[in-house]
Amino acid sequence: MEVRGCVTPKICLREVRKQYPARGVAEATTALADMSLDIFQGEFVCIVGPSGCGKSTVLNMIAGLVEPTGGAITLDGEPVLAPGAERGVVFQDYALFPWKTVRENVEFGLRYRSKGRVPKPERERRVQHYLDLVGLGGVGRKYPHELSGGMRQRCALARALANDPQVLLMDEPLAALDAQTRLVLQEELLRIWGEEKSPEERRTVVFITHGIDEAVFLADRVVVMTRHPGRIKNVLSVDLPRPRGGAVRTASRFQTLCDEIWQMIRDDAYAAVADG
């Protein structure tokens, strides 16, 4: 097993494959081929690549929502066989309950968790803490349809964080937002990730995105994937200082990293568009 110094990986993927069975006369589809990757405690890792390269499949397998066809995925050395409370997932489409208020959405996991409900006073304290953390402290009684897209995504993030997961899995969570809101939430996400816990306890984040600039702004490392079947083409360390604010986007090193990643995926991206 690969180590960083004397630190073993938080998440380990070894020769992971995913193949979807054939339907009718069609051949089986290989979404992911022999992917090996180590992700360490407290890292912020972004995965980029052309459409159809298996980015979301990787995240869903780490979440325990999709079973690999081959290979192994472990979390703290234990096999990932099913979803678990130690992994929180934030999707692109928010996945909020429309009939529940913002507070009730954030509280949901604490109330119905399989390992026992959190006592009401602690639930209320924790819900308010995370609503305040994501800037929704004053809208707890509103319903999702009364919120903007950015506020809904903040609510989804608060719901995931309220369960205190060790790992936060984010599948293009900002893709549906307008450009200005997206930039604001990128900075807010880094603030929450960087400030909520001490460096030793910081959550491990796996973030799927199509945005190269988003990946460079957020990540410690960027995993670049090929078109289908998905494989790792390269893993780049982002050597930009933290904490990062909007000014880092104007740095020459920021643009250089974006250009390097684009050159890696350019041909695959064009081919993916041509394939429809």
Image: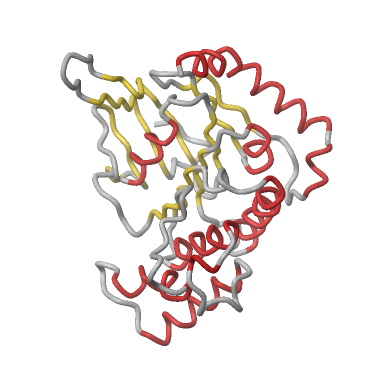
Instruction: Residue 84 in the image: state x and y as whole percent.
Output: 31, 55
Q: Nearer the viewer, residue 55 or 45?
A: 55
Q: Nearer the viewer, residue 144 or 223?
A: 144
Instruction: Residue 141 in the image: state x and y as whole percent.
Output: 50, 80
Quarter location, residue 160: bottom left
Residue found at the very far left of the displayed protein:
24
Instruction: Residue 51 in the image: state x and y as whole percent.
Output: 48, 26
Q: Is residue 214 left or right of residue 29?
A: right
User: Which quadrant of the figure contains the N terminus?
Assistant: top left
Instruction: Residue 208 in the image: state x and y as whole percent.
Output: 51, 39
Q: Residue at horizontal 16%, vertical 19%?
A: 24
Residue 226 position (above or below residue 166): above
Residue 205 position (above or below residue 267): below
Quarter location, residue 81: top left
- Figure coloring: secondary structure
Residue 209 position (above or below residue 165): above
Number of labelled discs? 0
Q: Residue at horizontal 83%, vertical 38%?
A: 250
Q: Is residue 275 left or right of residue 119?
A: right
Q: Nearer the viewer, residue 207 or 178?
A: 178
Q: Residue at horizontal 29%, vertical 71%?
A: 112
